Amino acid sequence: MLDGLRILVLEDEFLIAADVEQLCRDYGAGEVVVAGDLAEIEPEHVAAQFDAAIVDLMLSGTSTLGFASRLRESGLPFIFASGHSEVDELKTAFPEIRLVSKPFSGEDLVEAVAAACGRGPLA
């Protein structure tokens, strides 16, 4: 489902980040880059470096909504994967972006990323 995709994972919990990275690789992602802090990312280059992103709503106590707005403006497909409950704010600001709530199943996450990239559901 993710064959060849270059995926950015914004996640500050090490074990979750490692699981998501392996999950993406298991489903064929070509490259997976994990960042635990927005300071590790150059927003102006993200769209050129990646095909999709998985974004946690909070990284080390900092909201990622501004970063997500820049992703949307650049046209980079992305999803939110979060255990935070700002669902109403998220639905208002990003009604077209899917939220996969933690704890999530691997298939839910992969299907959401694939759908964001215009790829079909798992068989």
Image: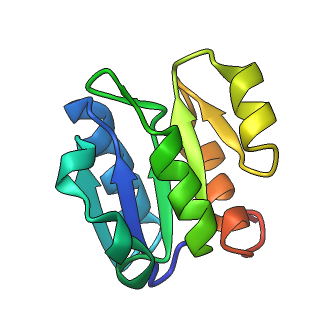
Residue shown at 63%/19% (left/top)?
A: 86
Question: In the picture, which quadrant includes the N terminus?
Answer: bottom right
Residue shown at 32%/42% (left/top)?
A: 19
Quadrant of residue 76 in the image? bottom right
Note whether residue 96 is visible: yes
From the top left corner, tell me how far across and down residue 38 is, in percent.
27, 46
Question: In the picture, which quadrant includes the C terminus?
Answer: bottom right
Q: Looking at the image, is 67 positioned above or below residue 4?
A: above
Q: Looking at the image, is 58 positioned above or below residue 93?
A: above
Q: How many marks?
A: 0
From the top left corner, tell me how far across and down residue 77 is, in percent.
61, 67
- Relative placement, left or right, of 2 versus 86 is left
Note whether residue 76 is visible: no
Is 50 in front, or is 103? Answer: 50
From the top left corner, tell me how far across and down residue 72 is, in percent.
62, 62
From the top left corner, tell me how far across and down residue 26 is, in percent.
40, 63
- Relative placement, left or right, of 57 versus 20 is right
Is 88 in front, or is 17? Answer: 88
Q: Looking at the image, is 10 positioned above or below residue 93?
A: below
Image color mode: rainbow
Residue shown at 49%/77% (left/top)?
A: 51
Residue shown at 19%/48% (left/top)?
A: 39
- Relative placement, left or right, of 121 versus 39 is right
